[in-house]
Image (tube, rainbow, N blue to C red):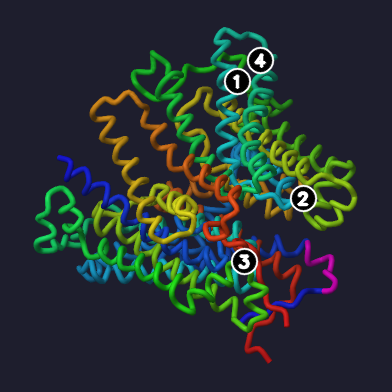
Amino acid sequence: MITLEKRTSVPQWLRYATPLLAIGVTILLGGVIFAVLGYDAPKALSVFFLSPLSRADQIADLFVKACPLIIIGTGLVFCYRANIWNIGAEGQLVLGALGAGWVALSFPDATSYSILILMALAAMAAGALWALIPAFLRVRFSTNEILVSLMLTYVASLLIDWLVRGPWRDPMSFGFPLTPLYADAALIPPMILPVVGRIGQLHWGVPLALLIAVIAGIIMRRTLAGYQVRLFGEAPRAAKFAGFSPSKVTIGVMMVSGALAGLAGAVEVSANIGQLQPNISFGFGFTAIIVAFLARLNPMAVILAGLVVALAELGGDAAQISLGVPKVVTGLFKGLLLFMLLAGETWTNFKISVGRKS
Amino acid sequence: MYEELLLTILLTSVPLVLAATGELVAERSGVLNLGVEGMMLMGAVSAFGAAILSGSPIVGMIAGAFGGMMTAAIFGLFALGLATNQVATGLALTIFGTGFSGLIGAPLVGKAIDGLPSLSIPLLSDLPLIGVAFQLDALAYISILLVAFVAYFLKRTRWGLVLRATGANHDSAHALGYNVLAVRWYAVLFGGLMAGLAGAYLPLVLTPHWAEGMTAGRGWIALALVVFASWQPWRVVVGAILFGGITIMQLAGQARGWTIQPQFLSMLPYLATIIVLVSISRSGGVLHKAPAHLGRIFYPTR
């Protein structure tokens, strides 16, 4: 029997300790599970969490992997802060990729990088509109936004599947479900650093992601819009008395998070793939939810959280090669981490006691 | 030929019926468990592993139910015991279940088992066309019995009323002296048992081997189905046959060169669910509305 008692005051250190503790316990539990199943646990853990950090180019790739997670996670922070549960970021990401892809494929001879700006705008518009559907239904008919945004994710992945197999397929692709390659100007250029040159797959989307998280942090803390979002999450009644419109906040945060998820989709395709294909995301939209929670819904912390979760993703690739376990096993760590974070959240707000009720 | 088509549709719909009926009970008690896909995968891998070890698909079936229930217990520990956010906890369960089942299942890839045998019901199975509905396997018949049980339990028994009351308003149920968390624990565990059976159906009946992520989104369709059925058990069966039918029709249609794109057919269940969601949110009827306290956190205060 677990009993919870609301804390009257939350010690400051607890807020910072819980995410770190959650990471530690996750790794420990993961190791125990590997050991119980007869794997060499220390080896498994080092494959997952240390091997992706052993070379400079791998650390660069960590940032590349974290890039979409940071962009999407930042948007989700706004939603979740306002207590709006957008879990359809995966679909909004796909729509963003389609929006950007539509621009890129319309100008196959583009030579100016200004097309990238056009693609980014199209991606953000498409993602925001896809997120507007659950937001509008929620505001107008008080329909559950969780279920609608989830359903639309599957509609989106079927939509891209149809487009790349049908109308947008490259006639020269020998029947493969691929669009033509984007023009060079429509590809996000790799990042060439002074002295060291190019490291790993590092591209200009990465600094963009960091910039977005920082700007979002400033908006959340220093502007009226950010204040509205926070107030709505923490004290919806007070927000109403203050004259803020719940509908506007709902639509606003949903569209912001949709736009950012869409942008992430455009960046992912334009920097790493170069054309559209049926699968452009490996569940980034869902994984970003973990990132948002790990950051304790704080935009700046999303950067760090994105890197941590990206590490588990890269670890999955490494484990597939050297442990012979499928890549999905990385979900074991991601799932455990989310569980532990949620438990940490409870621990922050409640005194937990286990035992018989007195 | 039509008989074969109907049989495939029925077989496709059985796991949907099982998983959705379990989730329906959990949701009626006020718990939104988005971990159906994860519980199904754990059920599938438990069933397959146990069937290999024991050589018996019946043992596999029981192990599948147990595996699903244990996975649901993790959800209960967090969402009920620690009062964590149900949406996030459910997602964590699906992500965890996908990874964990992939890890346990890694040594099982490439092995094969004997599935559940089909049991023909004499006389009825000789009927033209609908006779195929009586040539199914034990688990398929059990699934219909379980739907009947759930429908009766929810509507006609005292404990069914208590369960619905916890979903409609947990504060009132608590004030009346009912143990809200205990009711929700039972409902969540039942949901896990059913999802485990649904997962077990895949390797035991549909494809006699294990593959990581073999549920392929059926858990999410089951979640849609509960809403589509507006939380009514028998409508789950109708919806499952419709959803299953759409899946099969698009395969059959592709083979026959239909002009409608298969992707648009596959979208229909999701779009129909959204339409149902909107229409039940609009209409005033209390009877077919979502449980009012669905997804709300409850922890007892004195």
Q: Amino acid at mark 1?
A: Leu
The verdict on residue A13 being magenta is yes
Nearest the eye: B233 or B112 = B233
Secondary structure of residue under mark 1: loop
Do the dots labelled 4 and 3 sit on one chain? yes
Q: Amino acid at mark 4?
A: Ile
Residue at the farthest front position: B284
Do the dots labelled 1 and 2 sit on one chain? yes
* Chain of the residue displaying label 2: A
The residue located at (75%, 39%) in the rendering is A252
The residue located at (18%, 51%) in the rendering is B130
Cα distance between the residues tagged 1 and 4? 9 Å
Mark 1 or 4: in front is 4
Cα distance between the residues tagged 2 and 4? 32 Å
Q: Earlier in the sequence, mark 1 or mark 3?
A: 3
* Chain of the residue displaying label 3: A
Secondary structure of residue under mark 2: loop
Mark 4 or 3: in front is 4
* Chain of the residue displaying label 1: A
Check disc 2 and report the residue beneath it: A298
Do the dots labelled 1 and 4 sit on one chain? yes
Mark 3 or 2: in front is 2
Check disc 1 and report the residue beneath it: A187
The image quadrant where one finds the C terminus of chain B is bottom right
The verdict on residue A22 being magenta is no
Range drawn in magenta: A8-15
Check whether the beta carbons of the residues at disc 4 and disc 3 lie within 8 A of each other: no
